[in-house]
Amino acid sequence: MPKSDFILNIGLTGSMLDGPRSEQISLDLACFTPVVKPGDTVLAGDLVAKAKVSGQGDLHSPLAGEVVEISGLSEFSMIIRAKGEGSVEPRDLSQTTGAELKTILAELGIDTTRMPSAKTLIINAMPPEPGILVQEQLLRDYRPFVARGLTAAKSVITPSQVILAGVGVDASAFGSCAVRLLAPVYPNGLDPLVIKAVTGEENPPDFAILSVLELFLIGQAMETGLPCTQTVVTVGDKNVHAMIGTPLKALLDMSNITATERDRVIIGGPLRGETAISLEAGISKDSLAVQVIPHGAFPPVEDNPCLNCGECVLVCPSRILPNMISRTAEFRLYDRARQYGVDACMECGLCGYHCTGRRPLLQYIRLAKKELAAMDLTENPVEKAEAPKCC
Amino acid sequence: MIRPPKTLFTVSCPPHIHCGRTFNGLMLETILALMPAALLAVVTYGFPALRVMALSCSVAVLVEAACWKVMGRPQEVDNFNALLLGLIFSFLLPATAPWWLVTVGSAITIVLGKAIFGGLGGSPLNAALLSWASLHLSWPESMDIELNMLGSSFADPLAQLKHFGVEAVANIPLTDLLLGKQVAGLGVSHILALLVGGLYLLLRGRIRWHMPVSFLTGVLATATLFFLVEPGMHPSPLFHLATGTVIFGAFFLITDPSSSPVGRIPMLAFGFLAGALVMVVRVWGTHPDGVAFAILLANLLTPMLEKLRPKPFGLNISGDNHA
């Protein structure tokens, strides 16, 4: 595989494909508490798990079937096997607005913690990582859904200003919203950097930012009145409109991509995605892409010492010192990692990409963050309880 | 219930792609970049130069292997770093250096320059320069380039300048200096060959431009300042660029990752400071060249220079006072 050029829009060909009809789906339970037991029968759209953090959007069964098991390979998934027919009744959302709509959207599986009341709403139409074509497709072919989602989001967020940021987006996209064109290069599509490009400020107050996919999911829920059980992922060079929980195997088979022993199967992009343990794992609402990186395509990560070349510092968009953070985390000196700016890390993965020593820099950064969060919690339990983060 | 997966995939933290730059590759390419100068050294000084380089490299590799053994750490002598350090160190020696000097120096490079600080990335000082300075203070006669190269048909222009004043070097054409018609450490006098190697590393992205450019700017700016303030007392600024260890230092010494700072502003400040110090030593110091001491001094300032870093993203606005 060639050295990445980090170009974000690789050009979309063709229209969105319908997802594979899978007999068995696997729902990721990492952020959810299940409300059904193995053996229960569910209808399509039935609530199966509640979000651990209120407002992050509950989880519903995408198909009618029987809950086969909860746990599975990673102990964090729920497997539902298709059985019978039937779906929940759609809700009429045409008259609902504001706070009431926000509550209902969360019940329908939309993450409403990203929709606070704010003065400015930014629509992030940038592909977050190379190889993700979802945004391009939705803006090109599914604009009515996105527009419907935007109307609903506006009703919840009540912004006085809406700005669309993306690559080659046109001003007429959604009526009167302002447009900001950004260079299609990673990491420009990450939320903090999009906000900075649009406003000139870093982490300004009174802002909400939603991706085109989020708006599409809201629009889909508004149109159908049904819970969010379908999402869009890029597989290869095509986008697939698939049920959440669709096993990776079905998606890869559909696109004739094979994954063999020791390859990496990535849910998400090459710089921030997570590797799957098994092809039975299913996609979730925000998966965005499924990619396979063959074994041996890149030099592997190794337990090498940091040689202080400083490449990571030169590329870091957060202007922190990944070299020193990784060194301190290596020796469990997490307080010092904080002095080197670990809290500002946006986890773009560029430091690891450029590391001459091939050190797992992002892993060290995440370790430091996690340990620091645990330390904060023991020192000051009250303060942290007010701001729960997604697990 | 945990089922063993049928196919085992690689599971890892992101990122899942890599730029392809590896440490071994970096070492090999740096050695490759030194080859033109090494070749010309053999052409100029003959067998003695080859002898010094070969001995220095072999001792460095053997001593490093012994160090890891003694320290009970996994053997990493196969990463070419010791080979490169041995080669860099030998470049600084006179071509006639006796075997014991080369052996002691090469061993110091590895033991005091690298292993004692824990290996790669730990050394606060440039290993080869540390060794050079130790030898220079211990056996000044043996390390004196001019004294040891009396048999050569060329002279050391910096020693000429130091001992006989600016008139002595006024008539040396710049092209002679560029073509290596001067005496210096065995590998550092072939300015053009070193420039070729340095540019190769720059274009391949193996070193970044900040330190070489700011170092050369520092030398040039300070030399120009002296040239203008005391007219007739100093040779042209370009003379200073083309003599001694300046070009070698700009691409191969100051860019040593372990002892140099990270970040754009610290790198630029570090290079400029080292460059300015070269001229300070050359004009006011007792040592004719000055590059080695200038870089070592700048190395000591690295931790301080690294404080010149920007605020982390967003922390200056959100009022987050962790940093």
Image (tube, rainbow, N blue to C red):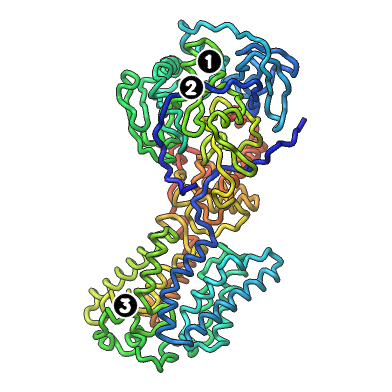
**Contact between labelled residues 3 and 2, with CB atoms less than 8 Å apart:** no
For label 1, the crowd category at 10 Å Cα-Cα, with few meaning under 14, some 14 to 19 and many 20 or more, is: many
Under mark 1, the amino acid is Leu
Q: Is residue A168 above or below residue B94?
A: above
Quadrant position of residue B118: bottom right
Whole-percent x and y of residue A378? 67, 37
Under mark 3, the amino acid is Leu
Figure disc tally = 3
Whole-percent x and y of residue B275? 37, 69
Q: Is residue B246 above or below residue A288?
A: below
The residue drawn where x is 37% and y is 30% is A165
**Labelled disc at residue B178:** 3
What residue would you read off at disc 2? A115
Under mark 2, the amino acid is Met
**Contact between labelled residues 2 and 1, with CB atoms less than 8 Å apart:** yes
Quadrant position of residue B292: bottom left
Disc 1 to disc 2, how far (Cα)? Answer: 11 Å
Whole-percent x and y of residue A127? 44, 33
**Contact between labelled residues 3 and 1, with CB atoms less than 8 Å apart:** no
Disc 1 to disc 3, how far (Cα)? Answer: 74 Å
